Amino acid sequence: MQSLSDRLFQANSLFSPYAVPHGGGLGRAFPESEDRTRFPFQRDRDRIIHTQAFRRLKHKTQVFVSGLPAVALAKAGHGDHYRTRITHTLEVAQISRDIARTLGLNEDLAEAIALAHDLGHTPFGHAGEEAMNACMQSCGRMFEHNDQSLRIVTLLEDRSANYRGLNLSKEILEGLMKHRPSPRAAGLRSASRALSLEAQLVNLADEIAYTAHDTDDGLRAGLFTLKQVRETKLGFLAAEKSMERKTELRGAIVDLLVTDLYTETDMLLEKHAVSSLEDVYASQHDLVSFSETMTKDLSELPTFLWNHLYKSDAVQVQAKQGQRVIRDLFSAYLKTPPEKVLELQQKTGGALEEAIKDYIAGMTDPYALQMHTLIV
Ligand code: MG
């Protein structure tokens, strides 16, 4: 077997000069000795996969709530084929790896960020997040899922007696901060350092994945037709491509978006004379991006999905029920905190409402519904 340092040298030599090399450079909050066989970002990925928060993603809503009765879904077929938060996450990780590999970037870093990017989601999807944010705002606080993802990997998950959280490489934590420094993130990321290309590409892979699979799920549920999708620019181009290739629409959407991303990103890296990781960190511009035309074409599809999918009766009925569950649990636990909440509060040393938020946000859809039956 080759030594780790030989493998590290070999693997890094395959990267573009602006990739984050294996071994990173920013380190971990709690210094650890190197693993004998895995590079640091590969260890990070494995730690993320083995968390409880990751396993719970399988029963968290992406768009459709599997645990609630819904006439439209019953009519449309078996609910098992709709995306959940975990299959969404796996699709984002797959697209991220492909983009990273093609651009000569660090696949393992991109994959680890992708696998952790939605850990902080509440039950019941974005509707759940809105309800949780409203509950927290009534206590003068806030909730945002990216911030919660960071809280999970830096505080709530346990794996060692030496430190809190997972002690991930700082490159992963920065990647989870996405667009803006949150109150929790402010101390972690240097204000002057931009996101790595690996972190930037995961943000777009997320957008590519949900645009493609939400269109697929919406068609499956019969909430709109292919003819309607074709009325959007991207939908039209993808439908043409899918006919030409004789393959599914979802893949054609992904193909169009990643192909555009490659051309635009190459152009931007050249335009801004990016030739090292330092250049990336110092850049004031988004360097991984869709072209202006594609950004415009792409923007029609989310609007279409918003009107036909997210705002559809089938999804809204579930969303409203989910929001009620979160509100009811929150106010019941404020009056009488259950044992689990008190344990969390003791562990994190924060306010009661923070611990209630951590507990409820961590729940799966069916678990939240089950807990709701105990309080009403
Ligand atoms: Mg996502």
Image (tube, rainbow, N blue to C red):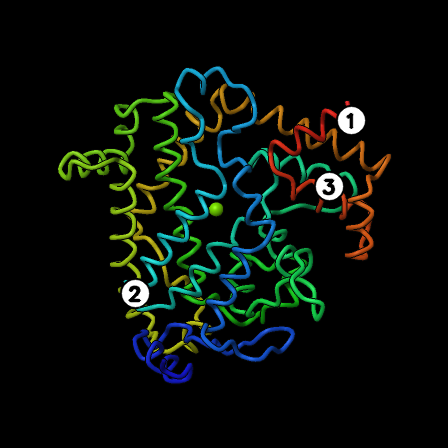
Residue furthest front as drawn: 1
Residue 47 coordinates in the image, percent (x, y): 55, 61
| Quadrant in the picture for the N terminus | bottom left
Instruction: Give me the disc on residue 261.
Output: none
256 or 361, which lies in front? 361
The image quadrant of residue 327 is top right
Residue furthest right as drawn: 335
Q: Nearer the viewer, mark 3 or mark 2?
A: 2
**Looking at the picture, which amino acid does disc 2 mark?**
Leu
For label 1, the residue is 375
Mark found first going from the N terminus, 3 or 2: 2
Residue 171 coordinates in the image, percent (x, y): 51, 68
| Quadrant in the picture for the C terminus | top right
For label 2, the residue is 103
> What residue appears at the point 41 percent right and 50 percent down from the top-left corner?
92
Instruction: Tell me: residue 238, above or below residue 344.
Output: above
Near mark 3 (Cα within 10 A), the count class, few <14, some 14-19 or many ≥20, is: few
For label 3, the residue is 137
Instruction: Tell me: residue 62, above or below residue 266.
Output: above
Q: Secondary structure at mark 3?
A: helix
> What residue appears at the point 43 percent right and 27 percent down from the top-left corner?
309
Near mark 2 (Cα within 10 A), the count class, few <14, some 14-19 or many ≥20, is: many
Near mark 1 (Cα within 10 A), the count class, few <14, some 14-19 or many ≥20, is: few
The image quadrant of residue 30 is bottom right
> What residue appears at the point 34 percent right and 62 percent down from the top-left corner?
100
Q: Nearer the viewer, mark 1 or mark 3?
A: 1
Cβ of mark 2 under 8 Å from ligand 1: the answer is: no
